[in-house]
Image (cartoon, helix red, strand yellow):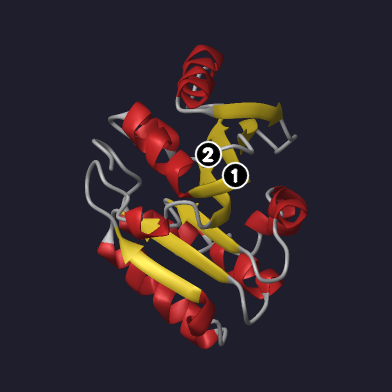
């Protein structure tokens, strides 16, 4: 999906345990996921958030993880296997311009795109794809790095999300991040 994307080898730095001190998955995502849910982790990398979501959703939950880079997905699969979460993780390599999740239309409870929307060459298409897979009432958390994404650029992304059909419901506080929590309307 990206014209420029995070190098695959940097994924190892993004899963270091010390990251939890400043970007704790439990504080960031736990309020949005529950047992039995289906979640979409877009630009999942090596699964910093994916594995925790899979644990919280229980054996009947599912986390669909998509990333442009096969090496990121392969590392995620190895980590999921070691954690005993393989059955809850659906890891997919996406293509440029297509998340490869059209089979999920209207089935996802929660989606997250953490520090990756700025890498997407066609944000309107991307946002429409995320909107399409969400159930009515489903939520989408978009977070971008403050040092990398200007306020103007982030506001443009939030405007595009509204044009895709999302309603802004919150701006959760995440360290050094610009954030927006959206909801899909309750009527399809």
Where does the image place residue 32, in percent across and percent down from the top left?
71, 52
Q: How far from the left and from the top, in percent, is residue 80?
A: 50, 79
Q: Name the spot of residue 17 as percent of width and height, x first.
A: 63, 65
Quarter assignment of residue 175: top right
Foreground: 155 or 106? 106
Image location of residue 155, percent across then percent down: 54, 16
| Circle 1 crowding by C-alpha within 10 Å: few under 14, some 14–19, many from 20 | some
Q: CA distance from mark 1 to mark 2?
A: 6 Å
Q: Is residue 29 above or below residue 87?
A: above
Mark 1 or mark 2: whose residue is earlier in sequence: 1
- Do the CB atoms of the residues marked 1 and 2 lie less than 8 Å apart? yes
What element does badge 2 sit on? loop
| Residue at (47, 16) in percent of width and height | 156
In this rendering, the answer to whether 111 lies above or below 87 is above
Q: Mark 1 = which residue?
A: 136
The residue at the far front in this view is 187
Quadrant position of the N terminus in the picture: top left
Instruction: Write down the quadrant of residue 186 in the picture.
Output: top right
Frontmost residue, 68 versus 128: 128
Q: Which residue is mark 2?
A: 188
């Amino acid at each position: 999906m990206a014209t420029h994307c995070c190098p695959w080898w940097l994924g190892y730095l993004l899963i270091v345990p010390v990251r939890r001190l400043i970007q704790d998955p439990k504080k960031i995502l736990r309020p949005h996921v529950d047992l039995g849910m289906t979640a979409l982790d877009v630009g999942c990398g090596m699964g910093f958030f994916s594995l925790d979501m899979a644990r919280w959703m229980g054996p009947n939950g599912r986390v669909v993880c998509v990333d442009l880079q096969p090496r990121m997905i392969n590392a995620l699969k190895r980590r999921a296997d070691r954690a005993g979460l393989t059955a809850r993780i659906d890891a997919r390599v996406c293509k440029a311009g297509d998340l490869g999740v059209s089979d999920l239309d209207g089935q996802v409870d929660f989606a997250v795109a953490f520090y990756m929307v700025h890498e997407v060459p066609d944000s309107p298409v991307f946002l429409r794809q995320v909107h399409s897979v969400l159930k009515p009432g489903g939520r989408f958390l978009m977070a971008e790095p403050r040092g990398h994404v200007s306020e103007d650029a982030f506001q443009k992304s939030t405007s595009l999300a509204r044009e895709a059909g999302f309603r802004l419901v919150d701006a959760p506080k995440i360290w050094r991040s610009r954030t927006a929590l959206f909801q899909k309307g309750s009527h399809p």
